[in-house]
Image (cartoon, rainbow, N blue to C red):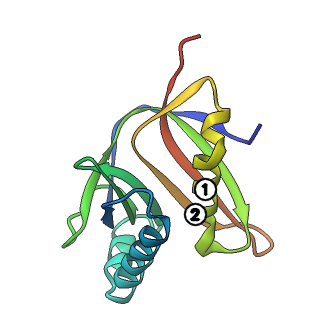
Amino acid sequence: MSNYSIKTISENYKMTAFGVSFEDFNDWAGNAAKTAAKKAEITENGKLAELLALADGQEYQINYVLDGKAWRGFGVMGDFKVEDAIVLDFLAGDYLVVPGTGSNKDSLADEITGKVFSGLLQEVTDYKYVGPGNSTFVKAAENGEFYGEMWLRAKKVDA
């Protein structure tokens, strides 16, 4: 069984982010390219730095369902007014928290996301992922390693 915990968030919260919608959720290569292009764009034009400066400096990779379509972006915790950014609602409740470590900061969020959606969610039988979104952060740890966590809203499954 993979490593995870359940943490309860007592109040709704918001995240502000820049991102892209996907027409075909199963177009993994195309979606990865669109996501990478958006990340490069907001890094180069300073929009991501602007958001990080307004918040606590912690960047999140966010997956969400917007208007019935899969959406992925990069942003911060909180509600900020920045041109072209959107504010997403995350609901209070229980969250499945999945940690991970690695040596590559840029790929760790994707590695954790892959682990969660390629098998971990099927292993977790006492909780069910209910969305509408999830977020992953990565920060420096010790010895040149990085630490990350993915947070997914979940509901306890009645036995």
**Side (left or right) of 155 relative to 41:** right
Vertical relation: 92 (above or below) 84: above
Residue 139: assigned label: none
Location of the C terminus by quadrant is top right
Q: Which residue is mark 1?
A: 114
Picture quadrant where residue 122 is located: top right
Residue at the image position 57 percent from the left and 48 percent from the top: 117
Q: Amino acid at mark 2?
A: Asp
Residue 110: assigned label: 2
The one nearer the camera, 78 or 71, is 71
Vertical relation: 159 (above or below) 45: above
Picture quadrant where residue 123 is located: top right
Residue at the image position 49 percent from the left and 71 percent from the top: 29
In whole angstroms, how far apart are the C-alphas of marks 2 and 1? Answer: 6 Å
Can residue 30 be seen by looking at this rendering?
yes
Locate residue 133, reporting x and y percent: 40, 46
